[in-house]
Image (cartoon, rainbow, N blue to C red):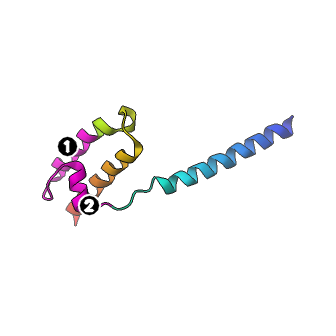
Amino acid sequence: MLRFILIAIAIFLLFTFFLKKSRKNVNTPAKTSKQAACQILGVGENATADEINTAYKHLMQQYHPDKGGTEGIAMQINQARETLLDSLKN
């Protein structure tokens, strides 16, 4: 009986490890261009950090996975925000 439990735990841990590893590869978004990021967030190319963050918050309220959106859409919105904020730093 103990042997069965140990085997079941080992299989569970291996399955969990490989599942997490495969999800990381799927959820890594490609780098978004500045133009695409502006279109996703609905802001102009000369948007300020406040405008970017306001548009981001508005979209995430609608498309967050907990609010009925998908992880893919949320990732695109996050990547767009990151791209535009990074472009302001440079």
73 is within the stretch colored magenta = no
Residue 75 percent location from the top left of the image: 37, 49
Mark 2 Cα shell of 10 Å, populated few (<14), some (14-19), many (≥20): few
Residue drawn at (20%, 49%), measured in percent from left and top? 52
Task: Indicate left or right for 76 with 22 as reference.
Answer: left
In the picture, which quadrant includes the C terminus? bottom left
In the picture, which quadrant includes the N terminus? top right
Residue drawn at (20%, 44%), measured in percent from left and top? 55
Task: Indicate left or right for 64 with 16 as reference.
Answer: left
Which of disc 2 and disc 1 is earlier in sequence? Answer: 1
Which residue position holds label 2?
Answer: 86
Q: Secondary structure at mark 1?
A: helix
Q: Amino acid at mark 2?
A: Asp
In this picture, is 70 found above or below 31? above
Considering every residue shown, the one lying at the far top of the view is 67
Residue 38 percent location from the top left of the image: 21, 55
The mark tally for this picture is 2
Q: Secondary structure at mark 2?
A: helix
Residue 89 percent location from the top left of the image: 22, 63
Residue 60 percent location from the top left of the image: 30, 40
**Which of the numbered marks, if any, corresponds to residue 31?**
none
In this picture, is 19 found above or below 30? above
Q: Amino acid at mark 1?
A: Thr
Mark 1 Cα shell of 10 Å, populated few (<14), some (14-19), many (≥20): some
Chief secondary structure of the magenta portion: helix
Residue drawn at (20%, 61%), measured in percent from left and top? 88
Which residue position holds label 1?
Answer: 54
Q: Could you give the CA–CA distance between mark 1 and mark 2, rounded to whole angstroms?
A: 16 Å
Task: Indicate left or right for 85 with 29 as reference.
Answer: left
In magenta, the rendered stretch is: 32-59
